[in-house]
Amino acid sequence: MLKILFLLLMITGTFCFVKYSIAEETPKNQGEEPEGGDCCTASKTGKIECTELAKTMKEIDKNYKEIKAISGYTTFGEKDWNVIHESSKELIKHTKKVINEFPRPENSKYQELNKTLLAEAEILLEVAHFKKEVGAVEDAQWQIRNIRHTCASCHKHLGLHIYPNLYPKEEKK
């Protein structure tokens, strides 16, 4: 019994030592939002920039994540369909705002991808209206994947790196 108690104390002590050693080595700001809130981005020069476009994109991301969270379900309940309905309406609203208020006429691919996102969100809203039809769940899942693909394509086109902590960029030499 005494050996087991001693072993447990040793394991606990080792765990605490490792935990606090790692915590001291982790930079204080790693994983934290930049100063100025979560609608700010760090520019290439290191300057923190808060823009209306960043705020709008954050809303698009929030609504996308709400539908993405349920996209793997094999069936959708009434609550799930409500999430799809409301989130797709919000995606439409915010995408229209991006198209109208933040156009980049010199960048036709950006314009095209925004219009594609709008079309995919409108189709998802239509699917939500026909939620009782056979195949509606699969259609909704398909549209959510199309939305994800459109967002990823635009981010790649613009060179946006949205998860720097997960996938650090390699510096070019």
Image: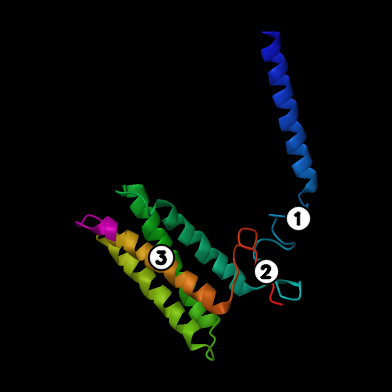
Please tell me which of labels 3 and 2 falls first in the chain: 2
Q: Residues within 10 Å of mark 1 (few under 14, many from 20)?
A: few
* Three-letter residue code for mark 1: Asn
| CA separation in Å, label 2 and label 1 | 14 Å
Task: Tell me if 89 is positioned left or right of 158 in this view.
Answer: left
Is 132 a magenta residue?
Answer: yes
Name the residue carrying label 3.
89
Which type of secondary structure does the marked residue at label 3 adopt? helix
Task: Tell me if 143 is positioned left or right of 95 in this view.
Answer: left
Which type of secondary structure does the marked residue at label 1 adopt? loop
| CA separation in Å, label 3 and label 2 | 26 Å
Magenta part of the protein: which range? 131-138
Q: Quadrant of the C terminus?
A: bottom right
Residue 85 picture quarter: bottom left
Which type of secondary structure does the marked residue at label 2 adopt? strand
Name the residue carrying label 2.
41
Main SS category, magenta section: loop
Q: Residue at x 46, y 55 (%)?
A: 66
Q: Residue at x 43, y 69 (%)?
A: 149
**At which x and y percent is residue 141?**
33, 59
Disc number for residue 114: none
